[in-house]
Amino acid sequence: MAVDQAVVTGVVIVIIVVLFMMFLDLLSPLILQHEFKACCRPYVFMAESENGLSLNDQKRLKEALTQLGIKNIELSIAEKGTSKRMTVIPFSVKGEIHIDGFKSLFEREQRVLEIQFEATQIARRIKVFE
């Protein structure tokens, strides 16, 4: 192998590695958004079956989202048992993700991405009066 072939091969390998790193950098917000939605989805089903979420469940949801690295979490969820049958229960979770990303080839910068999950369901449980 001649020197010029080695140099070209080295440059091609560096370009491939840089492109792969940029691809992973662009893919990471999508992966985090998928994890965010996967974390919120079971609580939507729980809120639907119980006509809202208890304060304890809301706290657990916030803790789970914090473990994912989501900050400034805002919940807009009806409290458990406060909704009447056949009324609309809003379920909204908002937060921010802080991600380091490429600014240019040799520079990185911190980006703040807002992330949101919204669902609307109808209260199905009959409220039992004691």
Image (spheres, helix red, strand yellow):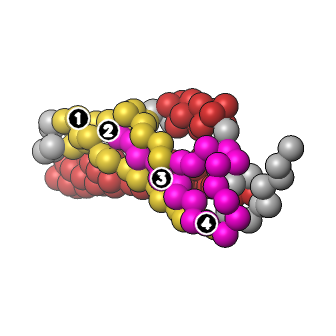
The residue tagged 3 is: 92
What secondary structure is marked by label 4? loop
- Image quadrant in which you'd find residue 130: top right
The question of residue 47 being in magenta is answered with no
Q: Are marks 2 and 1 in contact (CB under 8 Å)?
A: yes
What secondary structure is marked by label 3? strand
Left/right of residue 113 with respect to residue 70 in the rendered view: left
Disc 3 marks which amino acid? Ser
The furthest residue to the right = 130
Q: CA distance from mark 3 to mark 4?
A: 16 Å
Disc 4 marks which amino acid? Thr
Mark earlier in primary sequence (2, 1): 2
x, y percentage for residue 85?
Answer: 70, 64
The residue tagged 2 is: 99
Q: CA distance from mark 3 to mark 2?
A: 22 Å
Range of magenta residues: 77-96
Q: CA distance from mark 2 to mark 1?
A: 6 Å
x, y percentage for residue 22?
Answer: 29, 50
Count of numbered circles on the image: 4
In this picture, is 109 found above or below 2? Answer: above
The residue tagged 1 is: 110
Disc 1 marks which amino acid? Gln
